[in-house]
Image (cartoon, helix red, strand yellow):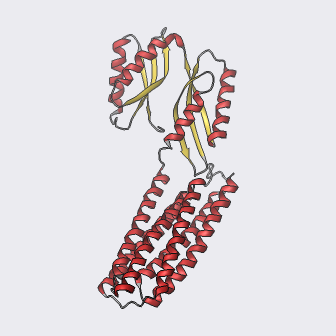
């Protein structure tokens, strides 16, 4: 599966490289012959796209390095840095384009467009739209941020080329020079695309919340199994677009034997790997139905408290007067110790003789 992914990402990138080199050459020829900075900047932008595709190929190759002692989780996150490098290239292109456009506004030069200029740029727009849609589709299909970034950039280029075509049309029909202003528009579009890709790349490198649709599917799949009351504390760490490691706690009957639990946890791990390609460690919470009234009372206190998202992992020891549970809170709770103290006080209003322990869980998945 990984070999197929690498092969298709590389193939898509090579198509992008060839298309952008050809478009860049044609636009550069038109720009130099006409003396139009907007067309030359459009050509440079296409050339930067070709460079971005080369970076994507290098990134996918490096990301497939085998895990070792220094990086036991592999090199999959290199792909996120690849998208970041592409963003920097785009921003640098946009910044230099902006400067050149300003120069053309201050000191405009006479343009010499021909009818074939419009034909070339118009054809380039169609090619860029097709390339952008194809690259973006392949990026989503094979979960490659770098390809998605390249696809978005190609679609932005099509818009940029529309502005270039308008500038050519104005020059041909009305003999009016808006070259520098068109260049400004081009630069702004390039900068906008680069900044958006940069922010997305930084977010991925820092680590983002996993897709809620996926985490809900994982929990639902686990809860469908026999002897499972619930799935909690799901955490997923992403080590690249095609590698994730995580953990989850399942609530099961306290009557199950160690062998039953062993078989159940293996079944969960195998199922999650097969369905979602995630390596999952499974912990357990034991549930005893004779303490259901405790569970219900505690859960009502939790759900009635602002900033909470639920409770689970209950432990009741009536002989030693111990109560313990996990309370899930959102990120608006800043003073966690005060929250725990207040929650313990509410529980002890119902169970004054019990020692109460509360473990706070943050909402890491959904």
Between 97 and 74, the one lying in front of the other is 97
> What residue is at 69 percent from the left and 56 percent from the top?
4
- Residue 358 spot, x, y in % from top left: 42, 24
The residue lying at 54 percent from left, 62 percent from top is 133
State left or right for residue 296 relative to residue 176. Answer: right
Above or below residue 331? Residue 180 is below
On the image, the x and y values in percent for residue 16 come to 58, 69
Please provide percent x and percent y for residue 127. 54, 71
Q: Is residue 96 visible?
A: no
Name the residue rendered at 41%, 63% in the picture: 195
Asked if 306 appears above or below 147 in the picture, the reply is above
The residue drawn where x is 69% and y is 51% is: 1
Residue 207 appears left or right of 187: right
Q: Please say whether residue 79 is visible from this viewpoint.
A: yes
Q: Looking at this view, name the residue that lies furthest to the top.
A: 319
| Residue that protrudes farthest toward the front in the picture | 173
In the shown orientation, is residue 189 left or right of residue 133? left
Most foreground residue, 119 or 189: 119
How many labels, in total? Answer: 0
- x and y, in percent, of residue 301 in the image: 37, 20
């Amino acid at each position: 599966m990984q070999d197929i992914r690498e092969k298709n990402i590389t193939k898509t990138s090579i198509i992008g490289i060839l298309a952008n080199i050809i478009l860049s050459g044609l636009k550069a020829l038109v720009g130099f012959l006409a003396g139009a900075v907007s067309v030359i900047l459009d050509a440079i932008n296409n050339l930067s796209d070709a460079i971005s595709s080369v970076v994507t190929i290098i990134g996918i190759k490096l990301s497939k390095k085998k895990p070792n002692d220094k990086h036991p989780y592999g090199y999959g996150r290199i792909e996120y840095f690849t998208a970041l490098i592409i963003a920097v290239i785009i921003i640098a292109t946009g910044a230099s384009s902006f400067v050149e456009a300003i120069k053309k506004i201050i000191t405009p030069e006479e343009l010499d467009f021909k009818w074939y200029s419009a034909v070339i740029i118009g054809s380039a727009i169609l090619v860029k739209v097709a390339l952008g849609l194809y690259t973006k589709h392949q990026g989503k299909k094979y979960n490659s941020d770098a390809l998605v970034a390249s696809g978005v950039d190609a679609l932005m280029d099509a818009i940029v080329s529309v502005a270039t075509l308008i500038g050519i049309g104005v020059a041909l029909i009305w003999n009016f020079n808006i070259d520098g202003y068109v260049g400004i528009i081009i630069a702004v579009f390039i900068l906008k695309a680069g900044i958006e890709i940069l922010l997305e790349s930084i977010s991925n490198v820092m680590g983002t919340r996993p897709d809620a649709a996926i985490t809900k599917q994982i929990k639902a799949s686990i809860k469908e199994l026999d002897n499972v009351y619930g799935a909690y504390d799901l955490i997923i760490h992403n080590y690249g677009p095609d590698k994730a490691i995580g953990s989850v706690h399942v609530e099961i009957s306290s009557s199950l034997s160690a062998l039953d639990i062993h078989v159940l946890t293996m079944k969960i791990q195998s199922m999650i790997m097969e369905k979602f390609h995630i390596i999952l460690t499974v912990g357990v919470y034991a549930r005893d139905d004779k303490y259901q009234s405790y569970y219900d009372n505690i859960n009502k206190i939790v759900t009635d408290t602002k900033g909470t998202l639920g409770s689970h992992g209950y432990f009741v020891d009536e002989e030693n007067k111990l109560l313990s549970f996990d309370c899930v809170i959102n990120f608006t709770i800043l003073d966690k110790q005060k929250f725990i103290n207040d929650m313990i006080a509410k529980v002890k209003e119902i169970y004054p003789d019990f020692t109460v322990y509360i473990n706070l869980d943050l909402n890491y998945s959904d």
